[in-house]
Image: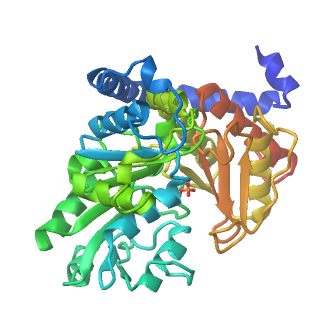
Amino acid sequence: MDNIFSQLGISDKVFGFGERILERISPRFSEIDRIAEYNQAKVISAMQKNRVSATCFAGTTGYGYDDVGRDTLEKVYADIFHTEAALVRPQITCGTHALATALSANLLPGDELLSPVGRPYDTLEEVIGIRESKCSLKEYGVSYREVELTADGGFDFEGIRKAINEKTKLVTIQRSKGYKTRPTFSVEQIGTLISFVKSIKPDVICMVDNCYGEFVEKIEPSDVGADMTVGSLIKNPGGGLAPVGGYIAGTKECVERCAYRLSAPGLGQEVGANLGVMTSLYEGLFLAPTVVASALKGAIFAANVYEDLGFKVVPNSTESRHDIIQAVELGLAERMKAFCLGIQSAAPVDSFATPEPWAMPGYDSEVIMAAGAFIQGSSIELSADGPIREPYAVYFQGGLTWAHAKLGILMSLQKLIEARLVDID
Ligand SMILES: *Cc1c(COP(=O)(O)O)cnc(C)c1O
């Protein structure tokens, strides 16, 4: 048993260190399994209710009129999220595209967008126009305002009240921390924020960037009042099998506008061939609850390993979880490289590669990424990344299986020790 780990390059010392941590955290794993069991039943129930059958897996081409597989999948998503409608498409190229579609479809010139949770995810800065970009919302006359979180990561209710004005049309709430070391919000907290916003301005549209949050809890932001819940299929809900895609689940009115923006006014959801990816989208969704559970176990293991070694980890070793991301503040660019090398070395694909920082499109500092993934850039697969800037934090996420997540974390520690950047004595 242990021999295979030493063949892979993991020392007895590192392996033993991991085993001691595991003894401590295994009780939390059963709680995660229980949530996965609930969400598995929720997914199966939605598939049964919509009579998913082999017909749904057929590929379509051209306009994609009357695409039963695509239309049924959208109903399945709407049932899982308890929304009137959903747009789930391989033509949505990534999470940023899904969010940009939701925003630009529902904001018109003269409207204002408000983020009551501080600066949104890096790639949205150009979508909004916080950083100048062609075709940004700003260029189309949509203004933007943000309210910082309080020092302890809470909502600044007074500041939010003041920021909402007659132009405020849409409020965007990012659930996950993204490349920040603020806390991720629970669905319940998001519900409190939505209720507060709607008590001030009832007709404001509340959108939640749900990236990395799907199936971590038993409820989703759409269960607590979000008008649009948005995410990427190469993260949680694709279960590692979806080769591409994004989703927007929400009210009929909002989703229809999104479909008009994505294809064309008048065409909307009627067009969009599925190009033969339906089996992966359905099967990935079916697997997603247990894949998310594996990723969560990996995140908790990583938090405990690195907190024990004296690093600041967000969330910390005992906090409750609301997304699958684990931030580890390593304090040095060199440590980020060694950590990422470990994750890469443990991968089934491209394990021989060495991650190096690069200027990724959409990000304003250099980013290092480790991913040996079956689907390019898929971060529900075991991966680590982070911008090369203070506090030199790596964001660790994913793991289609818990065993792989564990191996990756042990390997990251091994590489840090070999580079003499960490000591476990
Ligand atoms: C990943 C992510 C996005 C963007 O998704 P891409 O698929 O990388 O474009 C947006 N918001 C959050 C919180 C994310 O984690």
Instruction: Give the percent coordinates (x, y) of residue 253.
Output: 23, 57
Expressed as whole percent of the image width and height from the top left, the position of residue 202 reads 13, 68
User: Where does the image place residue 273, in percent across and percent down from the top left?
Assistant: 50, 41
Which image quarter: residue 169?
A: bottom left
Task: Check the image and report above or below for 252 versus 128.
Answer: above
Q: How is the image coloured?
A: rainbow
Q: Residue at x 32, y 68 (%)?
A: 106
- Horizontal side of residue 6 vs 132, given as left or right: right
User: At 80% from the left edge and 47% from the top edge, which residue is drawn?
Assistant: 341
Q: Is residue 233 left or right of residue 114?
A: right
Residue 392: quadrant of the picture = bottom right
Q: Residue furthest top?
A: 1
The N terminus appears in which quarter of the rendering? top right
In this orientation, does residue 213 appear?
Answer: no
Left or right relative to 84: residue 115:
right
Asked if residue 320 shows in the view, the reply is: yes
Task: From the viewer's side, name the closer residue of 382 and 68.
Answer: 68
